[in-house]
Amino acid sequence: MQIFNKRDDLIFIRFPIIFPLLYYLILTYFPNYEIYLILIVIFLLAEPHFAATWPIFIDTGNKEYLKQKKLFLIYGTAIISVFSLMLFFYNKNIFFFIFYIANIYHVTKQSVGICKLYSKGGNGFNYQENSIYLFNILFVVIGFLRFYLNVDFLSEIFFLNLIVISLIIINFMIYLMLYKNLSNSLTMLTGILIFLPVCFVSKPIHVILMGVTMHYSQYLFITSKVNFARSGKIIKSSKELFFRLLRSKFLLFLLLYSIVMTIFSSLSNPNINYLSSLIIIPLVGQMIHFYVDSFIWKFSENHNREVTLKHIVS
């Protein structure tokens, strides 16, 4: 099964390792440009990925589905928005704890979903699913210890990474030997590596950006294909996709959304009272994204298979 073609699927969906590698190299060799790196990733990848939910969600093909799921998709989205706002102003620590858990769960579910898509639910999918969940639970525990309980791992950081990377390699090799499918092995590996930075980065922001750039790449390529396919344009390569995007309203929407949300993110300043809360605007957008995606990508439902899944697979 392919979404675009074998080469593009590998580079941008199955194993888009180029994005976190570039992030790591820039962060390591140009630390003075850290803030610019963060803003560039937010503007070019993160916020466009959050924006891409909306054209898929409010597409005319979903009109009847929205009516059927009105309680969850209309009222539920409003409740999530209001709840996020209230909790943010009531207790930011609790809000960010819930936000990070929701983020991790959302990213993990996408990783598992992409493995299922390529393996068609067989060929070692259960192994892939269990591996991704187990490693991500491990990374949640490490992140909680490092960034919430402030446990000092600095003296043992080398051994921590050595143990974790050894486990990842062993797990990868076992899958490869059992199922003899390198492409599916790499798809699983992507789902595992996304949160690996929690073991070695110094700030939480890099945990939710560095490895998650792979998640953004996957989502943007898949939603772009679906968006064009729904209007009768079949895209079979990344090159064709880029040229289509340059002339599309879809890209214009993604950029406008990203500009607005990146401005709010960059203006937010915890040291200036009237600016300290601006970050809640993009954060609410992200919480809505987590929530809505749990419905529109649920391919166990006939509607989503008809209006979305059939446009993904080639």
Image (spheres, rainbow, N blue to C red):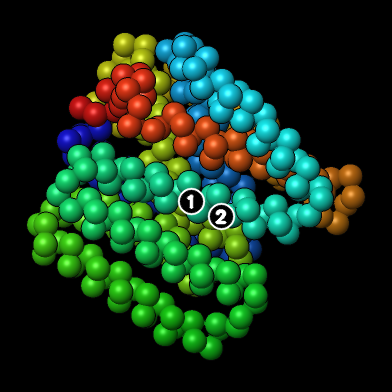
- Residue found at x 38% / y 41%: 218
From the viewer's perspective, is residue 231 above or below residue 259?
Answer: above
| Rendered location of residue 280, percent (x, y) | 73, 42
| Rendered location of residue 197, percent (x, y) | 47, 65
Count the numbered circles shown. 2
Tell me the number on the disc at residue 105. 1
Few, some or many C-alpha atoms within 10 Å of disc 1 (few <14, some 14-19, many ≥20)? Answer: some
Tag 1: amino acid: Tyr
Residue 80 placement, left or right of 46: right
Q: Which residue is mark 2?
A: 101
The residues bearing labels 2 and 1 have C-alpha atoms spaced at a distance of 6 Å
- The reply to whether callout 2 and callout 1 are in contact (CB within 8 Å) is yes
- Residue found at x 60% / y 83%: 152
Q: Nearer the viewer, residue 203 or 299?
A: 299
- Residue found at x 81% / y 50%: 90
From the viewer's perspective, is residue 165 above or below residue 57?
Answer: below
Q: Nearer the viewer, residue 161 or 241?
A: 161
Residue 93 placement, left or right of 24: right
From the viewer's perspective, is residue 17 above or below residue 251?
Answer: below
Few, some or many C-alpha atoms within 10 Å of disc 2 (few <14, some 14-19, many ≥20)? Answer: few
Q: Nearer the viewer, residue 241 or 56?
A: 56
Give the image quarter of residue 119: top left
Label 1: element kind: helix
* Image quarter (top left, top right, bottom left or bottom right) of the C terminus: top left
Q: Residue furthest bottom?
A: 155
| Rendered location of residue 50, percent (x, y) | 54, 36
* Image quarter (top left, top right, bottom left or bottom right) of the N terminus: top left
Tag 2: amino acid: Ile
Label 2: element kind: helix
| Rendered location of residue 270, percent (x, y) | 81, 55
Asked if residue 157 shows in the view, the reply is yes
Asked if residue 235 shows in the view, the reply is no
